[in-house]
Structure formats: structure tokens, C-alpha cells
Image (spheres, rainbow, N blue to C red):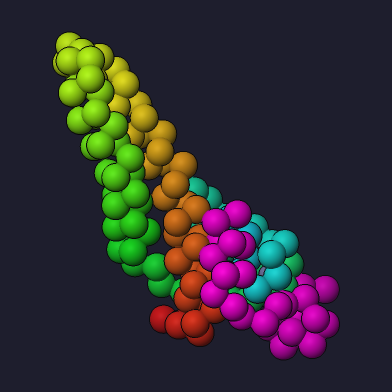
Amino acid sequence: MTPTPDNAAAAGLRSEPTTGLGLRRGLRLRCPACGKGALFARYLKPHAACPQCGLRLDEFRADDAPPYFTILIVGHIVVPGMLLLEQIEHPPSWVHAALWLPLTLVLTLSLLPRIKGAVIGFQWAQRIRG
Ligand SMILES: [Zn+2]
């Protein structure tokens, strides 16, 4: 039987919404309510509903927050690292390109879904829909 929002809550699959719990489960790419179901069907596409507890995940709109926070975090890692390396070693430009471009790409692609999960978890905890 597929869980529906009503019988999943009644069966005790879902936790009480708290901000820390929502953030942690979202960062682990899990449903914020039960912590067991996968949050995303594809890279950044959330399931319409949690496969475990039935929580409607399509009601949460993260919009531009995940890219904003991702740029903020990656920028605060890459830019100081680049400036520090330039001050200490003065490497040629190709070294900067070979080091910082792949690092930026890997950090961005790995952080973006986790940050989106955390934003959805935060919205779940604060009961922000639509
Ligand atoms: Zn769930």
C-alpha cells in the first residue's frame, strides 16, 4: 500500500518538524519528515511525494535559494584559496586554471543538491509551502 499523507502520519513514520532535523535530513538527500525516503528522483528534481511516508515534496519551492547559497559557500572556499596561493607561490595562470576550475565544478555539483535538500528541509520544519 502506498502511504498517503494521512495514514503515514498516523503510522508514526514522520517526525515532528524541527529545523535541525530538516536541515540534517535534507543535507543527506533524505525526506525531511521520515529520513528514509529519497528526496530527489533525479539530480535536482524532488519526488512528487516521499516514497516512504508520502509527504508531498512538490509543495516545497526552493527557487533560487540553493544556487545562491552554493555560490556563497563555493566562492568563500575558492576565492580565498586562489588569493592565498597567488600570494604564497605566484604560480603560472595554467596552474590556477588546472586547480581552481575543477575544484569549483566539483564543489558546485556536489553541494547544490545537498543545499537544495537542506532548503526543502528548512521549509518543511518551518511549514513553508508553495
Ligand atoms: Zn518521507
Residue drawn 76% across and 80% down? 8
Residue 51, placed above or below residue 13: above
Residue at 40% from the left image edge and 38% from the top image edge? 107
* Picture quadrant of residue 22: bottom right
Does 5 lie within the magenta span?
yes
Q: Nearer the viewer, residue 16 or 56?
A: 16
Using the rendered image of the protein, determine whether residue 58 is visible from the camera's viewpoint: no
Is 76 in front, or is 6? Answer: 76
Above or below for 86 versus 35: above
Q: How many labels were placed on the picture?
A: 0
Residue 24: x percent and y percent?
Answer: 59, 62
Residue 66 pos. (x, y %): 37, 59
Q: Which image quarter is the C terminus in?
A: bottom left
Q: Is residue 21 above or below residue 127?
A: above
Quadrant of ligand 1: it is: bottom right
Residue at 45% of width from left, 66% of height from top?
Answer: 119
Q: Which quadrant would the N terminus be assigned to in this image?
A: bottom right
Horizontal side, residue 43 vs residue 2: left or right: left
Residue range in magenta is 1-28
Q: Residue furthest front?
A: 88
- Looking at the image, residue 93 sits to the left or right of residue 99; the answer is left
When asked about the image quadrant of residue 51, the answer is: bottom right
Percent across and percent down for residue 61 are 41, 72
Magenta includes 106? no
Can you say whether 107 is above or below 51 in the image? Answer: above
Residue sitting at x 25%, y 23%: 85
Say which of 52 and 101 sits in front: 101
Query: Would residue 87 be seen by someone viewing this image from the given angle?
Result: yes
